Each structure stands twice: as C-alpha cells, then as structure tokens.
Amino acid sequence: MSLQMTSEFQHILRVLNTNIDGKRKTMFAMTKIIGVGKRFSNLICKKAEVDVNRRAGTLTNEEIEKLVAIINNPKAFKVPNWFVNRQRDFVGGKTSQCVINVLIAAVRSDIERMKKIRVHRGIRHFWGHRVRGQHTNATGRKGKVLGMPGGANAAKN
C-alpha cells in the first residue's frame, strides 16, 4: 500500500515541543517524544481510540489534543500506576508520567542526589565510569590514551 497524501496531510507535527514525522505510523511517531516509549505509545493510541496503523500526518487536531491529554494525565484515563515512568518519586512520593524537560530534570536531580549522599552509583557517575555493573577491563576506553607514547618500538630505542 502506498502512502496517499491529501490536502490536510501534515509532514511535520509539533506535539509537546517535539517535531514528529507525519509519514510514520502514529504509534511509532509518538515515540519521538522523550518519555514515551513503544508500549506507552501503543496504550495512549488505544485510549484515544486512534488507529495505530494510521499515519501521524493524517491525525486531526482533536485527536492530537486527546493524545496529549492522555500523556499529561494518564491516571484520568485509567492507565495503571505500573505503566508510568516515574513511580514513587523520591521527593514527593507521587507516581506520575514525566515527559520532555520534566523527565530530563528529574533524572538530573536523581543523579545529583546520588552524588551528594555518596552512594555507589553516584560515585561512579562522578568518576565517569560505567554505572550498571558492566565490565571495564577491555571496553569503555573511549577518550583515554592506550599504550605507551610513540608505540612499543619507541620504548626499545
């Protein structure tokens, strides 16, 4: 099936300060928004009664507003607590869905809090090392000097 464009087709949509490609299917186009993954995008399309196989450029303004409303307040649309990305926030203790700048600021504050209380993950972040238990003997050497200056032959001379 070829892509059929009508006069009301939008090539680029602006949703939540994010440019969304209108040629992609709605479910995958919504994943461009920071904080919205494939599963959450699928869920909001179903809650908004938008066909996931429709192209994002064919969405009407009402459908876009409904999708944004579900993203901003998923509890009002009966999205379970385990589905959202910010569960039992450390500061407020609330469960919410964070997107774009709020999510970036929340992650940054979490890392700063870990550094401040000197927890192991915070110390690894501070040092710039791998945080999640990866091996670091052979990999992760980007930006560091390897070997001797001038190579092995320079040391022999």
Image: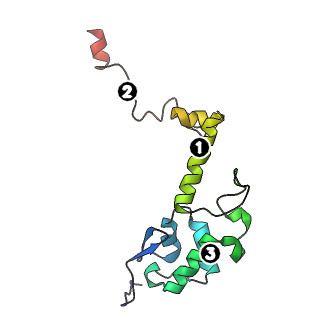
| Up/down of 139 relative to 17, above or below | above
Residue type at tag 2? Val
Q: In the shown orientation, is residue 54 left or right of residue 151?
A: right
Residue type at tag 1: Ile
Q: Residue 99 occupies which quadrant of the picture? A: bottom right
Between marks 3 and 2 in the image, the one whose residue lies nearer the viewer:
3
| Residue 8 horizontal/vertical position (percent) | 39, 89
At 65% from the left edge and 71% from the top edge, which residue is drawn? 73
Q: Is 127 or 129 nearer to us in this picture?
A: 127
**Marks 3 and 1, Cα distance to the nearest angstrom?**
28 Å
| Residue 133 in sight | no
Residue 14: quadrant of the picture: bottom left
Give the CA distance from mark 2 to mark 1: 28 Å
Mark nearest the camera among 2 and 1 is: 1
Q: SS at mark 3? A: helix
89 relative to 120, above or below: below
Q: Quadrant of the N terminus?
A: bottom left
Q: What residue is rendered at 52% in x and 32% in y? A: 127
What distance separates the C-alpha of mark 3 from that of mark 2? 49 Å
Please name the residue that numbered disc 3 is placed on: 70
Badge 3: residue crowd in 10 Å (few <14, some 14–19, many ≥20):
many
* Residue beneath disc 2: 145
Q: Earlier in the sequence, mark 3 or mark 1?
A: 3
Residue at mark 1: 111
Q: Residue furthest front?
A: 92
Residue type of the residue flagged with mark 3: Ile
Mark 3 and mark 2 lie on one chain; the one further toward the N terminus is 3
Query: Quarter of the image containing the C terminus?
Result: top left
